[in-house]
Image (spheres, rainbow, N blue to C red):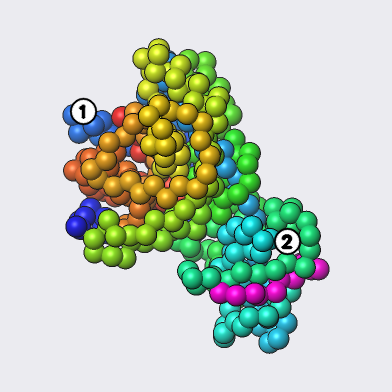
């Protein structure tokens, strides 16, 4: 089974390289499923576009400084790594980039020192397991030695090296204002549009908010490479739906409001939890839920989301929610109207 809508042509100049001047000044394409209409608005209009009694569900994951730079002790060559997670035995799982071939037992001196990593073995997915020479928790070490990673399509390059150059603005703007729980290697980008003032305006209108957590993994950037997308192997991400958010959703339902998911990551948590039990209950654990058309959503009534990469699982999820025809027309319209795409880009509200 193939899906033609997974592919589309996007001019390079529409890939946002910088965030909007203000978080809530991004453009917003509102897609109405009832009549397939499209309306051009702004993120700042959200309080007027939603209704009193609705509840916004936000992903409070925090992007960790997962990008590491170092030097190979054996060759003196430059090395770059992306921290993915800590294994139960304390080893770090990493993606590595360097010239030449890495070998088991090789030592990497991280800049700034004195942190060093010993490469233990390759992983089945092409990464490495490494043993740090320090006993502090990984997130503490990353705060000292790491940088916040930017997505590969942000093309601000170093004079030497292969990764985007992180600016002081990125350190603030590639993080939501409600980020609380460290663990993500990429931002939940729909949440980047919110400001404290916008959240206050929503609350004043009677639109509440609640939190879930999904630690976004590097798999979010992996394209679907099989003809039958159902055969794609979905990556796992850790998530949590707390009891207070279940209570907020239940109260929203009782008053006739809509559950508005902010981002595809939030959708994955809500829909995973909904399938774990007949009724919605608190949940935590790893999810590999793969949502594609057709799909029956059990919790989510509306979705705020950025524009996604071609051949991505995120595009499939949005297609399942919006409907394939509406999604295709929305993307055609967004390109024609010069919307900005991807992490630092504009957004869609699907109602």
Where residue 290 sits in the image (x, y, percent)?
35, 49
Where residue 236 sits in the image (x, y, percent)?
47, 53
Graded by Cα atoms within 10 Å as few (under 14), some (14 to 19) or many (20 or more), the crowding at tag 1 reads few
- Report the quarter where the C terminus lies: top left
Q: Which residue is mark 2?
A: 145
16 vs 202: above or below: below
Label located before the other in sequence (2 or 1): 1
Q: Which residue: 21% across, 28% down? A: 34
- Report the quarter where the N terminus lies: bottom left
Q: Which residue: 79% across, 63% down? A: 134
Magenta highlight: main SS: strand
Residue interval drawn in magenta: 112-122
Q: Which residue is mark 1?
A: 34
Q: Quick one: which residue is furthest to the top in this view?
A: 255
Q: Which residue: 58% across, 59% down? A: 84
Q: Dot 2: what SS?
A: helix
Horizontal side of 347 relative to 182 (left or right) equals left
Tell me if residue 294 can be seen: yes
State the CA–CA distance, disc 2 to disc 1.
Answer: 50 Å
344 or 122: nearer the viewer: 122
Horizontal side of 162 relative to 351 (left or right) equals right
Q: Which residue: 45% across, 43% down? A: 265
Graded by Cα atoms within 10 Å as few (under 14), some (14 to 19) or many (20 or more), the crowding at tag 2 reads many
Horizontal side of 57 relative to 333 (left or right) equals right
Where residue 19 sits in the image (x, y, percent)?
51, 47
116 vs 183: above or below: below
Residue 121 picture quarter: bottom right
Q: Dot 1: what SS?
A: loop
Horizontal side of 130 relative to 34 (left or right) equals right
- Residue 336 in the magenta stretch? The answer is no
124 or 15: nearer the viewer: 124
């Amino acid at each position: 089974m193939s899906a033609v809508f997974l592919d589309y042509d996007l001019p390079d100049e529409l890939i946002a390289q910088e965030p909007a001047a203000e978080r809530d000044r991004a453009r917003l394409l509102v897609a109405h499923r009832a009549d397939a209409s499209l309306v051009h608005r702004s993120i700042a209009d959200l309080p007027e576009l939603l209704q009193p009694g609705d509840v916004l569900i936000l992903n409070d994951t925090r992007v960790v400084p997962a990008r590491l730079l170092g030097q190979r002790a054996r060759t003196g060559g430059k090395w770059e790594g992306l921290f993915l997670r800590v294994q139960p035995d304390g080893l770090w799982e990493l993606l590595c980039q360097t010239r030449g071939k890495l070998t088991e037992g090789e030592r990497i001196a991280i800049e700034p020192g004195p942190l060093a990593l010993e490469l233990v073995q390759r992983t089945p997915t092409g990464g490495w397991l490494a043993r740090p020479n320090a006993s502090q928790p990984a997130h503490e070490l990353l705060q000292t030695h790491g940088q916040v990673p930017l997505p590969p399509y942000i093309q601000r390059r170093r004079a030497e090296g292969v990764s985007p150059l992180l600016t002081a603005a990125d350190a603030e703007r590639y993080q939501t204002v409600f980020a609380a729980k460290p663990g993500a290697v990429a931002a939940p980008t729909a949440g980047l549009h919110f400001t404290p003032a916008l959240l206050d305006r929503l609350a004043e209108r009677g639109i509440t908010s609640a939190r879930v957590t999904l630690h976004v993994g590097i798999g979010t950037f992996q394209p679907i490479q099989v003809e039958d997308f159902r055969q794609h192997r979905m990556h796992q991400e850790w998530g949590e739906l707390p009891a207070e958010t279940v209570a907020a959703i239940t109260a929203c339902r009782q008053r006739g409001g809509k559950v508005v998911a902010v981002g595809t990551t939030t959708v994955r948590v809500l829909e995973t939890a909904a399938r774990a039990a007949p009724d919605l209950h608190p949940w935590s654990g790893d999810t590999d839920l793969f949502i594609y058309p057709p799909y029956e959503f059990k919790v989510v009534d509306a979705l705020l989301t950025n524009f996604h990469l071609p051949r991505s699982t995120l595009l499939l999820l949005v297609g399942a929610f919006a409907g394939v025809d509406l999604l295709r027309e929305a993307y055609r319209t967004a390109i024609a109207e010069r919307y900005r795409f991807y992490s630092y880009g504009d957004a869609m509200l699907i109602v």
